[in-house]
Image: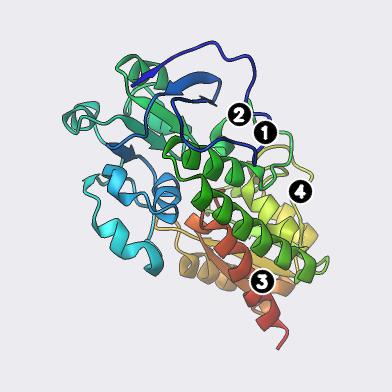
């Protein structure tokens, strides 16, 4: 079905693309691939990838999914229920082979590590096409350059091309861009300082200058207290947080680091309890899946915008 080729250039624009014809050519993290027909036995390896497929109505093209970080949104639950879950986390390579896939779609580069399902080149050599979401490709998104929403739109476009659903993809791209721009225009954060509290490491794990959490806060108009630190995710000492005394604390709610536990720490620590955001209980909470550059990112933007507006009521 697929073969590696020497492409003359990467896709030049996000919107200009043919409907599915004889072949589709694309690059995935520098790996050039040609697909001669729409895949019918796709497997998604992260929730981020799964939800792109579901949002485009491609569940009938899927024979498996894996690695769910949190609940699937209600609008996609019925479609998700039609797809077999082949592993709680990353499946073993042998498990993937049993399903005889023709397409593997991952949300994080770790999926294609040798210790997990194996490299993209390996699968392409087996005539199984692969795609890794654009935001997870360091060569396209350097860690010292602030990311934009373009990777979300690029993923929708390329998956739409691969599966021959160009019209659905273009509609979804337009809806996504419009929703994000609406919140950006409303500017609910209005220049207020904010701390993104991810996990309770020592030092604490938070947003750097250039990843999706930083982008999330910029769209909302918030000024991140770690926006001048290079990296997508960074560790900072609690003294950095105390020194900047943020007006709002954005809390990442994840299975491995629940929001309620972090709020409890903030309220009971004698130093952190003196932060203005803690004393005024100016917490806004976001599920992990709404912080990554996937279909849920737009929900995250709108979710936090509503919570910020409610803080002032």
Please give the label number shown on residue 241. Answer: none
Q: Quadrant of the N terminus?
A: top left
Q: Secondary structure at mark 3?
A: helix
Sequence-wise, the earlier of marks 2 and 1 is: 2
Please give the label number shown on residue 305. Answer: 3
Residue beneath disc 1: 143
Q: Nearer the viewer, residue 106 or 76?
A: 76
Residue 294 shows up from this direction = no
Do the residues under discs 4 and 3 have CB atoms within 8 angstroms?
Answer: no
Q: Secondary structure at mark 4?
A: loop
Q: Is residue 50 left or right of residue 281?
A: left
**Residue located at (70% from left, 73% from top):** 277
**Separation (CA) of disc 4 from disc 1:** 13 Å
Q: Position of residue 35 (x, y in %)?
A: 41, 25
**Separation (CA) of disc 1 from disc 3:** 26 Å
Question: Which one is closest to the eye, mark 1 or mark 3?
Answer: 3
Q: Position of residue 155 (x, y in %)?
A: 54, 41
Sequence-wise, the earlier of marks 2 and 3 is: 2
Do the residues under discs 2 and 1 have CB atoms within 8 angstroms?
Answer: yes
Question: Which one is closest to the eye, mark 2 or mark 4?
Answer: 2
Q: Place residue 280 in its image quadrant.
A: bottom right
Q: Position of residue 134 (x, y in %)?
A: 56, 36
Sequence-wise, the earlier of marks 4 and 1 is: 1
Direction top: furthest residue? 6
Question: Which one is closest to the eye, mark 4 or mark 1?
Answer: 1
Residue beneath disc 4: 227
Residue beneath disc 2: 138
């Amino acid at each position: 079905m697929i073969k590696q080729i020497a492409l003359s250039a990467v896709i030049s624009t996000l919107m200009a693309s043919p409907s599915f014809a004889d072949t589709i050519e694309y690059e995935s993290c520098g790996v050039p691939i040609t697909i001669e027909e729409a895949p019918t036995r796709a497997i998604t390896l992260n929730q981020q990838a799964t939800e792109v497929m579901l949002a485009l109505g491609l569940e009938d093209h899927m024979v498996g999914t894996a690695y769910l970080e949190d609940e699937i949104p209600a609008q996609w639950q019925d479609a998700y229920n039609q797809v077999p879950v082949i592993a709680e986390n990353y499946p073993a390579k042998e498990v993937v082979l049993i399903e005889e896939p023709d397409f593997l779609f991952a949300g994080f580069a770790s999926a294609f590590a040798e210790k997990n399902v194996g490299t993209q080149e390996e699968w392409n050599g087996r005539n199984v096409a692969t795609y890794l979401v654009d935001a997870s490709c360091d060569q396209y998104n350097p860690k010292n350059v602030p990311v934009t929403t373009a990777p979300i739109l690029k993923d929708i476009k390329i998956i739409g091309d691969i599966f021959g659903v160009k019209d659905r993809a273009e509609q979804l791209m337009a809806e996504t861009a419009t929703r994000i721009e609406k919140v950006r225009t409303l500017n609910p954060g209005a220049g207020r300082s904010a701390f993104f509290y991810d996990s309770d490491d020592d030092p604490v794990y938070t947003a750097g200058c250039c990843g999706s959490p930083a982008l999330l806060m910029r769209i909302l108009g918030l000024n991140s207290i770690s926006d001048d630190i290079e990296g997508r995710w960074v560790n900072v000492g609690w003294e950095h947080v105390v020194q900047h005394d943020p007006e709002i604390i954005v809390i990442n709610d994840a299975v491995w680091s629940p929001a309620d536990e972090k709020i409890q720490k903030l309220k009971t620590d004698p130093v952190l309890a003196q932060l203005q955001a803690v004393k005024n209980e100016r917490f806004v909470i976001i599920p992990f899946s709404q912080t990554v550059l996937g279909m849920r990112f737009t929900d995250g933007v709108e979710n936090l915008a509503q919570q910020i507006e409610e803080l002032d009521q």
